[in-house]
Structures are given as structure tokens and as C-alpha cells.
Amino acid sequence: MNKPALGLAIVLALGIGIGTTGAIFRVLDAALIQDLPYPMADRMVSLSMRDLESGEGGGPVSPLDFADWRDSTSIFVAMTAVSAESIVLTELGHPMRLPAARTTADFFRVMAVRPSLGTPAEQAWAEGYPLVAVSNEFWRIHLGADPNAIGEPLVIDGEPYEIMAVMPSSLSLPKEAEIWLPLPKEAGAEVRDGRFVSVFARLKEDTSVTEATVEMNAIAGRLADEYPETNAGLGIAVDPIREVLVGDTGLRLGLILGAAACVLLVICTNVASLLMSRATGRTKELNLRTALGARRRDLLRLLLSESLLLAGLGTLVGVALGTLGSRAFVALYPDEFTSLGNLGWSPTIIAFDVTLAIIATLLFVAGPAFQTLRADESKIRMRTVSVVRRGQGIALIAQVASTLMLLFGASLMLQSLYRLEQVDPGFRADNVILARVALPTARYGEPAARRAFFGQLIDQLRASPSIREVAGVTHPPLSGSNMRFRLTLPGGDAGEEPLFANYRAVTDGYFRTLGVPLVRGRDLAPADAVDAPEVAVVNQEFVRRYFGKRPAIGESLKLLFRSDPTREIVGVIGDIHHYGPDTPVQPEVYVPHTQHSWPFLTLAFEPRTTVTDALTSIRTVVAELDPEQPVDRIASLSTELNRATGEPRFQGSLLFGFALGALVVAMLGIYGVTAYWNTSRRPEIGVRLALGAERADIVRLLMRAPVGMIALGVAIGAAGSVGVARLLESRVFDIDPLNPLTFVTVAGLILSVATLTAYVPARLASHVDPRRLLRDD
């Protein structure tokens, strides 16, 4: 390879390696390292219900519990309850549904975010006055960034409100909320186990999360004694706000960053090996310069200047690729990896890029220059070749080990993805579309009004020529939302452990529309009206957990929610993975929407013609029933199912791409190193062939060193893969990360491919005419 081509290859290789690693680190910095957009964010915490038996936290809180927490502790500056919901805005020309949140008055003190316009009227907010705060985006898009927007009216869910403040873009709790409204005092006041709010608080300066946890769990113990039916077995989890916002993003990004760093290591070791070979080839030039009077520092300056130029250009290319790559990564990755901070420059990013540049320069680029000039001038040829061979051998071992660990991790993720995609979700997703209709409680507060609206809606849609099947459910699969209530089994052996089940209100035909099998009993029917006997359908997991081998049909259950009556179990359906195929099935209870109506319903329908025609029919019928009601959250159930496996698919594909790239680069490196070693042994090969050695003997001789190093690299990589397996243990689904078959398969693959790569130049070297070798030498 000529000098310009070699230099370009080195610059591009370093640029790709540094750019890939830098792009992932930029996302990691934005999500985990940069300060959150809240003053003194380290004092902000999330409070949630925690199951004392399982230790799992994150559960929603009832307004009654929140009120007791707030009134019983003095460890916080302020505490607020937040209920994420959607609202219908009718003031801007057509009905529009927007993400919103209802909060208590202390919300603004907890967030400590100053409005861009206006001021939070906390006292009026606490008293329930019809005031709202709007997001900066809402103010710009819907109000034209009007500086006089404060005091302007908005009609929300049919009720008049007044704009109190415009909040800055940094306020993002709850996620994507565009409007904040007061949480009514009476919300959830009738039942203690009606848990639907999130709780946030700001710690006092002289308190810690640990102290808050101790105090709050003492309060939880007192509430469990006072209200054993609803609070027994429940504690309180106190988590820093960053953990709530980011979740396990750090682990996911850390895994990807580690994979990118392995690719960078493989690339840099290849570059170092290439430069060492190039420096050795310049021995005659260096000796000639020495003979003409050049001193060692002159030669070192020459080699270093060339190396530093290559490293500097590679770093610049890497920084540019890292900046562009981070934005592409965020655009392609699932929503939860959306950056919380700025993807631009920060002190941490600058320090990281400088560190990468120094490592790449000193260890992998400038290093060969020092190695080349370690020997005395009189022995530069012999000792330099020895030093280069040792350095290239170490590089070869590192490449094999890094590639094996990458390929092992990628194989675990791909096996996990395959197992995940084999899980039966319990419903059919093909050609099923979802669309949500939510009625304002101000005008549809009575169950009869809700039953009438949704009853007419379903009947008219079933008569539409553009819709084959349609039914309704309060919380469809994969929606991410859920209702879970405690229950009792009258006449059954309930035991001491409280019983819980997920709750759905559905219209008749729902199971048929989603293809959920009826295992025993009967389906819900139009005859299950408001004046008919109260009934319910349960899933198989409900029967397994609460009835065992006893038949459930004909038995009774009672939901401990809003005085729900005792219901007869009339049917058992198949299990549904509500949150996705990687989550376990939970006990579920389905009741007729006519007997327990709600102001919101998601329509699940199968178009007869096109999706557009079906949606047009739905919007037309809804507008005829109530012109102020929008149809929103339109999604394909198959798309939602694909999204449920989107994260592991993306991670597996990314790791596989890294592993494949590292494998290709490593094999090229092995080929180049072994070819260089064979070239340096041409005189020895010629003498052995001239003395009658068989070509197979020459191949074995040339293969001895590289195969030994490859085997050592495989052994080191296999040991490192144990750590990779432990790291991925919580990220894989339904497989043992330490299963021997994966170890043997990946190790065997790397050993075979690397050995074959080393064999090709050895075989070529053994087939050269010995007379030509001796003559050339």
C-alpha cells in the first residue's frame, strides 16, 4: 500500500472507531451525566408504593395516601401529586386532544421552575380555581407566542379555564405534558385503593434519601395498621428523580458503549500493527539517515510528526462523526433513549474526546515510532523486527479476545430476541387498529350517558360497510396503561395473602375481534346489560393462581373498588401479555362495559376495506354523536407489538453490527500480520524448501505462532465472556447467558475463522519457488 493510501486508511479507521465510541458517549452524557433541567435536581425524589414481599416499587399512589404522607412528614420542602391524562381542547377551532397533567398546588415548588410568562397562583390553584399553565411549545404553536397570553381563556373538556402561566421547555414532568391543571380535592377521595397519581417531593437540604426512606416507611407501617384491607404489605419507595426519568438507560447505553470501545480497540490495534510493519520496512531509510548524520531525536521527531498528524486527522474525523452519529442514534432509538440533556458540546464530552485522542495517539500511533527506535543504531534491523513481532502478537491476541466477547454478547442478544418473538402474545395483531375516544366527565359524569354514547357508537360502527369487526376496551394490550384492583373470592379460601387482578371493562365481541380464545364457559354478550346479573370473565392465570385445579365457572368474585357488586365468573379466556411478550402474564378480570362504564374506551377494529375508510367512518359517527369529541391515539396493533420488541431488536442488531465489523477488521489484521511475518521469514522458507522440506511442513511451521496466539486470544475472550454474560443476565429473555453451547459455538467460530485467515498467507508463502526466494534475498 502506498503512503497516501495507507495514511487515508489509518485516518478513516481511527475516525470510525473514535466516532462510534464518541457518539454513544454523547448520548450517555446527555442522559446520565449532564444536570437535569431542574434547580438542585439532586434534592428531587419520586415517592411510590412498594410491595414489601417482592421489593418492587414504582406503583401509583392513591390521593388519600398522598394526603396522609404530606400531612405526616416534615422531611420535605414540598410534596405534590400528579395525574397524567389527556384533555380535549375546543377553543382553537376544532376539538383537539392533548397530553396534560392535573397537579396539586405544590407542583411548582417541587419542580422549582420559573414560568416564562406569568406567575403560579398557588393559593388559587390549591382552592381549585379554573387556572392552567401551558407549555412553551403550546404557547408557540397554538397561541402564536403571544406575549399577552396570560389571562386568555381556554375551554378544556367543555369547561372554561384561564391561562395563568407559560412554563419553560425544561419542564417535562409528566413526559410530553402540554397543559397543567389543578387536581380536584375530591379526586379519588372515595376509595383508598384507587391508585392513579404519581408523587414527587423536594428534600430539605439537611436530609438524605435514606433518611426519607426510613421516615416514609414508618408512615406506611402506620397506614397499614389503620387500613389493613388496602395498605397491608405495602411500603414506600423513595427514588432520586434521575433514576425515575432515566430508568436503566445507563446500563443499556453502557453496554453499547462497551461494545463500541471494543470495536475501537480492534481498530487501533490494527492501526498500530500496520504502522509497526510500515516502520520496520523503513529500516534502510532510517539507517541511511543515520549514516548521513541524523540523530536519534531527529528520527524520532520525523516518525512522531507523521504519527501525530495521522492521529490528529483521525481524531477530527471521529469528533465530526461522533457529533452526527449521536443525533442519528437518538433519532433511531426507542423513545426512552431520547436525550434528557444537550447532545452538543459539554466539558465531559471535550474531556472524553481528548482522552480518546491521547490514547489513540500515544498507545496505538506514536507507540510504534518509539518501538522502532528502541535499539542501538548498529542493531536496529534485528531488534526492531523482534520488537514489532511482539507488539503485533499482543495486538493479534487483543483483537481475537475483543471480537469473541463482542460476538458472544451479540449472540446472547439475538437468541433472546428469537425467544421473545416466539412468545404468543395471546391475541392477533394483524389488521387490528386501535383508536381512543375519551369523554369529558363534566358532560358525561353519569354512567347512563356514557353507556348511551358508547352503545350507539359501537352499534353504528358495526353497521358501517368499511368495518368488519369492532369492539371496545378500557386498556388495550401494549398500551402501557393498566388498572389493578384488589379483590375477594366470596365463599372461597382466600387465605391471608391479598388478591389482586388487572381490570378491563370491555364491550361484547372484544375477544372475538382480537382473536383471544375462549377456553371455558361463555363470552360476554349484549344480554349482559346494566339490569342483568353482574358477570365477569377471567383469564387462565387468574384460575391457576386463585383456584388451582378447581373449576372457576360459576364461582364469584368481588372487586374492592367503588362498591363493585359480587360478580359471577361465566367464562375463562386465554392469557394475554398485556405489557409485551417479555413480561409475565398477570391475573385479569374482564367485566361488561354496560355494567361498569367508564368515560374512555379504546376501539379495536378490523377494516373491511382500508384503514383510512374505517377511520373516516369512526370520526363521522363520533362527530354526529358529539361534535366536540376527537378520536386520538390511533395505532396499528401489529406496530405496537413490533415496538414492544423494538428495543431488544435494536440492541441485538447494533451489537451484532459491532461484532461483525470487529470480526472483519480483526480478520484483516490477522491476515496482514501473518503475511508480514511470513514475508520476514522468506529466506528461511527458501532454505528449508531447498533442503527438501515438504510444503505442508512449511505451512505447519508458519502456522505455529499465529495459531498459538489465536488460541490464547480465544481463551482470554472466553474468560471475558463470563463477565459479559453476567452483565447481560438482566437483559436477555428466557435463556441462560452462561449456557455452554453458546460459549463453544462462538469460541469455535472465532478459532476456525481466525485459523483459516492465518492459513491463507501461510499456504501462499509455502508455494513460492525456493530459487526465487534465495535469489531475491
Image: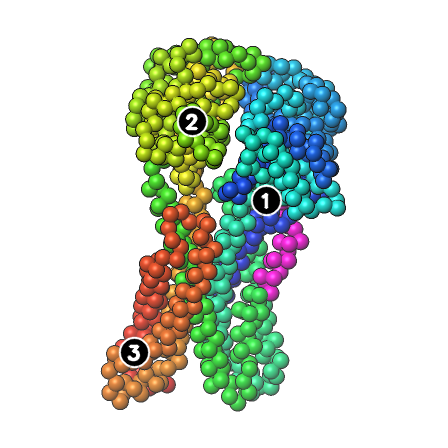
Q: What whole-number distance in Å separates the C-alpha atoms at marks 2 and 3? A: 76 Å
Q: Report helix, strand or loop for mark 1.
A: helix
Mark 1: amino acid: Glu
Mark in front: 1 vs 2: 2
Which of the labelled discs sits on residue 700, or is there none? 3
Q: Is residue 341 left or right of residue 777?
A: right
Which label number is shown at residue 243?
1
The part of the chain drawn in magenta is 340-358
Q: Residues within 10 Å of mark 1 (few under 14, many from 20)?
A: some
Which amino acid, mark 2? Answer: Leu
Above-or-below relation of 160 to 763 = above
The type of residue carrying mark 3 is Arg
Using the rendered image of the protein, determine whether residue 370 is visible from the camera's viewpoint: yes
- Image depth: mark 2 or mark 3 in front: 2
Image quadrant in which the C terminus is located: bottom left
Q: Position of residue 430 (x, y in %)?
A: 34, 30
Q: Residue at x 55, y 70 (%)?
A: 363
Q: Nearer the viewer, residue 192 or 185?
A: 192
Q: Which mark is residue 746?
A: none
